[in-house]
Image (cartoon, rainbow, N blue to C red):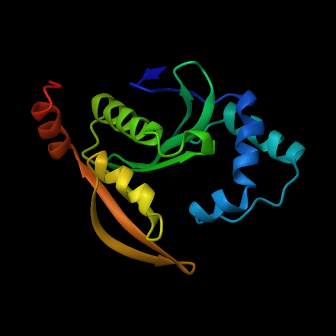
């Protein structure tokens, strides 16, 4: 378990499946994530979910986001780990709207970034977010990410953002973190 100031990151578990299915089948959340709505039934989803928990993809590290009192409010992950390039992509979703705009997402991103950079030799973490999702962009900037480009894929326009270890270390020193 990885503890932030407002959240805890923990391993995913089967009990998360109902929340995850509800969030992934929510049209508004899927649109924010530029993701298609799943067409599988919950029993099929649960079977696939259990299989992925049992046999996790090797280059994907998934975490549930919980409040400090244990309420599952979202998920985050880092994936596409490229040890040669020293980089990985980050993704996050706060699925429970009751926790939007209250810094839970920023704490989850900061906590995950701190974990990645303390536990790995990765030098760059990058992400993409819809250009229309200004709330997410504001959150990522607050966490130290900077825009570096744009991408158009499948009819969606994304802002590309990145954070480099050197900048993170400077930020940690500036804040008295190290």
| Residue 165, above or below 64 | below
Q: x, y (%) of residue 82?
A: 37, 50
User: Viewed as shown, does residue 42 lie left or right of 78?
Assistant: right
Residue located at (67% from left, 61% from top): 28
User: Which image quarter holds the C terminus?
Assistant: top left
Q: Nearer the viewer, residue 82 or 27?
A: 27
User: Viewed as shown, does residue 136 lie left or right of 122?
Assistant: right
Q: x, y (%) of residue 112?
A: 40, 35
Count of marks, rendered view = 0
Residue located at (27% from left, 37% from top): 121
Q: Nearer the viewer, residue 157 or 87?
A: 157
Q: x, y (%) of residue 9?
A: 50, 28
Residue located at (57% from left, 78% from top): 154
Residue located at (40% from left, 25% from top): 4
| Residue 136, above or below 142 | below
User: Viewed as shown, does residue 137 lie left or right of 64?
Assistant: left
The answer to whether residue 59 is seen in the rendering is no
Q: Quadrant of residue 119?
A: top left
The answer to whether residue 135 is seen in the rendering is yes
Q: Nearer the viewer, residue 90 or 140?
A: 140
Q: x, y (%) of residue 128?
A: 42, 62
């Amino acid at each position: 378990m990885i503890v932030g100031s407002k959240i805890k990151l923990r391993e995913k578990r089967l009990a998360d499946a109902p929340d995850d299915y509800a969030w992934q089948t929510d049209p508004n959340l899927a649109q924010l994530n530029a993701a298609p709505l799943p067409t599988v039934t919950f029993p099929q989803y649960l079977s696939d979910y259990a299989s992925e928990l049992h046999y996790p993809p090797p280059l994907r590290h998934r975490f549930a986001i919980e409040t400090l009192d244990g309420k599952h409010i979202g998920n985050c992950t880092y994936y596409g780990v490229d040890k040669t390039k020293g980089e990985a992509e980050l993704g996050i979703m706060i699925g429970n709207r009751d926790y939007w705009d209250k810094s839970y997402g920023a704490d989850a991103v900061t906590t995950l970034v701190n974990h990645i950079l303390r536990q790995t030799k990765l030098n760059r973490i990058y992400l993409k977010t819809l250009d229309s999702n200004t709330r997410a962009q504001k959150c990522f900037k607050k966490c130290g990410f900077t825009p570096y480009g744009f991408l158009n894929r499948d009819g969606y326009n994304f802002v590309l953002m990145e954070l480099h270890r050197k900048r993170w270390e400077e930020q940690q020193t500036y804040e008295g973190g190290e």
